[in-house]
Amino acid sequence: MRVGIVGSGLMGAKLGTLFARAGHEVVFSYARSEQKLSELAREAGAKARHGTVREAAQEADAVLLAVHWSRLDEVLSQTGDLSGKVIVTCSLPMNDDNTELVVAHSSSGAEMLAERLPKAKVVSAFNTVPSEVLFAVFEARRKLTRPSLVYCGDDSRSKRLAAGLIRDVGFDPVDAGPLRIARHTEPFALLVAQLAYEGQGGPELAYRFERF
Amino acid sequence: MRVGIVGSGLMGAKLGTLFARAGHEVVFSYARSEQKLSELAREAGAKARHGTVREAAQEADAVLLAVHWSRLDEVLSQTGDLSGKVIVTCSLPMNDDNTELVVAHSSSGAEMLAERLPKAKVVSAFNTVPSEVLFAVFEARRKLTRPSLVYCGDDSRSKRLAAGLIRDVGFDPVDAGPLRIARHTEPFALLVAQLAYEGQGGPELAYRFERF
């Protein structure tokens, strides 16, 4: 699969690297500098390269949107037409201080994005674990019990595609339902962040849903 | 410990029964009928009895508040003075249809309760797992890896007490921080409910945070 990374910060850089290691063709875009993008692509191996936001978005089977919420307008002005595209978003609608959600309860970042892009297929995923745990989970992916990763969306083909990407990086995909469930998964992401960054034991935190 | 159950519905009845089995003195109060309360107490064994809301609250070292949000005013009018009391609340601030939170994002049910009872010690716990999983987790409590249960609050002694109760019923208590984190744990409870009641595999669902 061709995966376009729009926003090659902490999450985008790590997920893109893991998608490339898992065998996908990855285009990194939108980082602080062209040099960072080119280094990222080189380190991620032969399956990865870097490009413009437009290239990353237009040539992709799935676009990972991993920009800070404050950059959304800017980045959406650069993607070109996203009609029909699968957009996997891990962008939480945080304020500039990263202290709280600016959209919550009666909507969610994922739903706002879907309203902005009514012809795109938006799936919310990858925002409920800290970036610090991603490589460790990938390395442990042959183990019997994988950590969970919740995702939600309204289009079943896009959700299957997102579930495949989740599996490829070592998690067990857990379908949380329609996109409006992002109203619950986004605050859950803040709970995980609280435990990871304020709790005991460091940020390499994941979670697993289990039935008894 | 003496635990007063205020609200002996699904959660209150099961948690009270497990607290009694774990050796605590339990007073069940506030159910649909006196008969239900007396049956509950009989089935929960020698450590359990039933009483009025006032008795359950006044004689307790910890009060479990497990009423529907719509009953909060009524029940608080019956408890007597709760100054200095440890209140462990699992009441989610749901609307009458149980479809969404009526307090969220800029506050939480737990914080509203603490504002109503400024001299009580409020801890939020037990609302992030469905009642259907409680007995199975208790039965499995000797196993090596227990499921997690998040709790939060502003008073450390009360939090230790709540953590002990969480441990007694078979979970691994996870301190999520101050009471305002209920703004994240309450929507998380709705995510768990979504997975339990709308997802694949039935409602006997728990979760575990793991570090990698």
Image: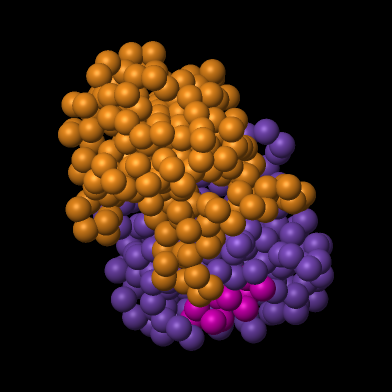
Chain colours: A orange, B purple
In magenta, the rendered stretch is B158-167
Q: Nearer the viewer, residue A106 or B67?
A: A106
Residue B125 appears in the picture as rendered: no
Tell me where residue B77 sits by quadrant.
Answer: bottom left
Q: Which of A47 and A166 is in front in this view?
A: A47
Q: Which residue is drawn at 49% across and 81% down?
A: B158
Judge left or right: residue A159 versus residue A85: right
Judge left or right: residue B5 versus residue B121: right
Residue B183: say if magenta. no
Q: Which residue is drawn at 36% across and 34% down?
A: A50
Q: Residue at x 59, y 33 (%)?
A: A23
Residue A157: image location, x then y, percent: 54, 18
Residue A114: image location, x then y, percent: 33, 25
Q: Is the magenta stretch mostly helix, strand or loop?
A: helix
Q: Nearer the viewer, residue B49 or B194?
A: B194
Residue A138: image location, x then y, percent: 61, 49
Vertical placement of residue B109 versus A210, above or below = below
Vertical placement of residue B189 versus B82, above or below = above
Q: Residue at x 67, y 66 (%)?
A: B171
Residue A70: image location, x then y, percent: 20, 44
Residue B86 appears in the picture as rendered: yes
